[in-house]
Image: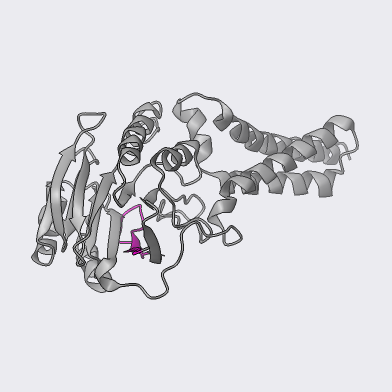
Amino acid sequence: MIKSDAAIQFLKWTFYCFGGVGVLFTILPFLRFENWWIRIGDFPRLQIAAVLITASIAILVFFRPEKFYEAGFLSVLLGCAVYQFYCILPYTAVYPNKVKLSVQPEESKTIKLLISNVQQDNDQYQNLPEMIRRTDPDVILLAEPDQKWLSEVSEIKENYPFYVEVPLDNAYGMALYSRFELIDPQIKFLIESDIPSIHSGVKLVSGDVIKLYCLHPRPPFPTESTDATERDLELLVVAKEIAKQSDPAITAGDLNDVAWSRTTSEYLQVSGMLDPRMGRGMYNSFHADHWLVRFPLDHVFHTSHFKLVAIERQPSIGSDHFPILITLELSSK
């Protein structure tokens, strides 16, 4: 009996600690600090909610809290779980669509964009050209290509005569391929000397020119950066640039941030851009190999000039990111 009581108490406090971790990671993102171990709480909100709900059910069903502090802690767990679900609610089907769906798109005003973080050490090179042939995008954005990658997939340029390539061996290379004419394409190093971005006009079949901002900032993670300052600053610089002009614009790339984070929300607010996933789904693109820890890190945002034709997550090409394929229509209204 003593052993049984000890085991029950151990299990009880295990669930309390389990729930406490969920509470901690719910609170941390409220702190206005850029440290990676604080900002990392922005990412796994669905997973944290699952931890909180699991701990709450276990405590309620098996241990029936009667003391005031036990009931109070249970209330905190449930409150944190509700907050986590609230954060991801815009990326579920119960939330109103932020971007209108184009029912009969005018093909001359559409742009089909494929974005893919190929993962520099991924050697399954032929998967990318095969996917491109299958999906037939107008514009392709690659993140993380080094010179080996670009050499292995050089056949892409046969059908995409307009391109910008920035091969790097630091996992921040970038390449842009287009069958549409690129107007004044520029390679910029906005914040860090080894983190490029590509800024270009894109001329649609209709003759309309849209602006495309291709980004891949450094993430807040111990092996990359100890805080989120550089990432957030790069996004803010681009957001302010977009806000100053009235032309149709698209931002695309692996932003190393989740759709529901404070940084992403501020980017959308400052730039005036929209997220077409709102009301439709998360479209988790990372990590392709671990279904328990998947987040929407690869993004396409756009100004209010566009309607959504379609958005899909593509099958894995061997990378740790799933490619994202999206078709937008430049609205005449």
| Residue 319 falls inside the magenta stretch | yes
What percent of the width, then of the height, locates residue 324? Answer: 35, 59
Residue at the extreme front: 333
Visual colour scheme: one colour
Q: Is residue 166 visible?
A: no
Q: Is residue 87 left or right of residue 237?
A: right
Residue located at (41% from left, 51% from top): 286
Quarter holding residue 31: top right
Q: Quick check: 290 above or below 270?
A: below
Q: Position of residue 265 (x, y in %)?
A: 48, 41
For this orientation, the residue located farthest to the bottom is 104
> Which residue range is magenta in the image?
313-332
Q: Is residue 266 left or right of residue 247?
A: right
Q: Position of residue 294 (x, y in %)?
A: 47, 51
Secondary structure, magenta segment, majority class = loop
Q: Is residue 186 left or right of residue 119?
A: left
Quadrant (top left, top right, bottom left, bottom right) of the C terminus: bottom left
Look at the image and say whether residue 113 sits in the magenta stretch: no
Quadrant (top left, top right, bottom left, bottom right) of the N terminus: top right
In the depicted view, which residue is nearer to us: 150 or 90?
90
Q: Nearer the viewer, residue 267 or 89?
A: 267
**Number of numbered labels in the structure image:** 0
What residue is drawn where x is 42% and y is 37%? 270
Residue 27 in view: yes
Image quadrant in which you'd find residue 325: bottom left
Residue at the (87%, 36%) spot, across then down: 2
